[in-house]
Image (tube, rainbow, N blue to C red):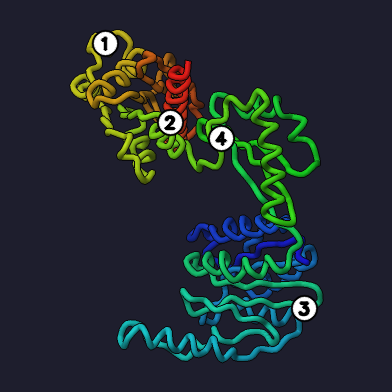
Amino acid sequence: MIKTAEILCVGTELLLGEVVNTNASHISKKLADYGVSVYHHTVVGDNPQRLSEALELALSRSDLVVMSGGLGPTYDDLTKETVAAYFGLGMHTDKPTEEAIKKFFASRGKGLCTMTKNNLKQAEIPDGAIAVPNPNGTAPGIIVEKDGKTVIMLPGPPRELCPLVDGAISDYLRKNTESLLVSHNLHIIGMGESAVEDALKELMTSSENPTVAPYAGDGETRLRVTAKAASPEEGEKLCGEMIEKIMSSTVGRFVYGIDVGSTEKALINALKEAGLTVSTAESCTGGLIAKKITDVSGASEVYMGSCVTYANEAKVKLVGVSEETLKKYGAVSEQTAKEMAKGVREALGTDIGISTTGIAGPDGGTPEKPVGTIYVGISSRLGERAVNLRLSSMRSRDFLRTCTAGNALSMALDEVLKIKNEAKL
């Protein structure tokens, strides 16, 4: 049975940073689903000696090595040959794969993509290996089992690799592992990671099954509850018992959703449930909050629109910020943030208005208002308020804007929950 694994990704383009290695992430998640422990990720270039050394090291410390890349038709695609040499295996042509390659090119039509002789190199696999058909390309997945070790070779392009991992490779793992992992994520706002850990320290430090681990996000904290079990039903039962313990603790009242995916999704769902609407007025975030919200399908039911009021004139004309406020307190101020939120709420006729105004840098800061001085405003029937996020001036402009958007969405979600709780009283 497979218990430990290493992921070995092949390609000089990965080392040069020309391609982002998303394959390792996808493979890791799938291995985790089946309770396989992954202790190492390795990337090696298209060099036979270094590839051979990396493979030998990986197999010395793992039951399974999952490789991606190096299965193409060119001279530098040497993954199969390296694996065959390690196990002392010969190579042969897999006839079903050869036919599939020929059909693939025949279906493309003349002139579009002509098959050359080296394309058939992809049909060559190590003796005794299992060829896994690839419906999205010409290089098959390949499984080699020998001497108590397993190597799974997968094509490099994610559009080919991911369907194989989610399909045939998952079926293989299901048959060759003793357990699986079931995980659920609890999303928390209004309570920081350190406070959550302090409240749940005994649960987090316990070696018992399931485990509880905290993660900090943009404006929220996430708790992952993971159970190792022999079946999905057993895993769900274990997770459910742990989630009940968490919900009955002081952390429970700060949990806004389970497995909601993102703050914006949770906000949209909460707005729909409460029958409320929202609008945004953005300065320093430049429409980023609007993008996050509209990325969620069905947002149009509750999201009325946005005003990107970057200049002071736009703040006055579009969302009714007082010129006196701008003159007295400045565009980056609690007062301006509150007036922006109230103004967009009234202009678009929504239940909730969100606003952002601040200095995202790298220029524009002053001793009184350094880079990272950013206000998020909220307006609803509960009134207006604004929070100074006081973000670090050492962080990048993109980080400050992203973090601001996350905090704004979290504050909006918190406002929805407060309105719902008020209605219950």
Q: Nearer the viewer, mark 3 or mark 2?
A: 2
Q: Which residue is mark 1?
A: 327
- Three-letter amino acid code of the residue under disc 1: Lys
Front residue (pair 253, 403):
253
Q: Position of residue 399 (x, y in %)?
A: 46, 36
Q: Nearer the viewer, mark 2 or mark 1?
A: 2
Q: CA distance from mark 4 to mark 3?
A: 44 Å
Q: CA distance from mark 3 to mark 2?
A: 52 Å
Q: CA distance from mark 1 to mark 3?
A: 76 Å
Q: Which residue is mark 4?
A: 187
For mark 2, give the secondary structure: helix
Task: Determine which of the numbered discs, if any, sits on residue 409 in the image.
Answer: 2
Residue 23, picture quadrant: bottom right
Q: Which residue is mark 3?
A: 146
For mark 3, give the secondary structure: strand
Q: CA distance from mark 2 to mark 1?
A: 28 Å
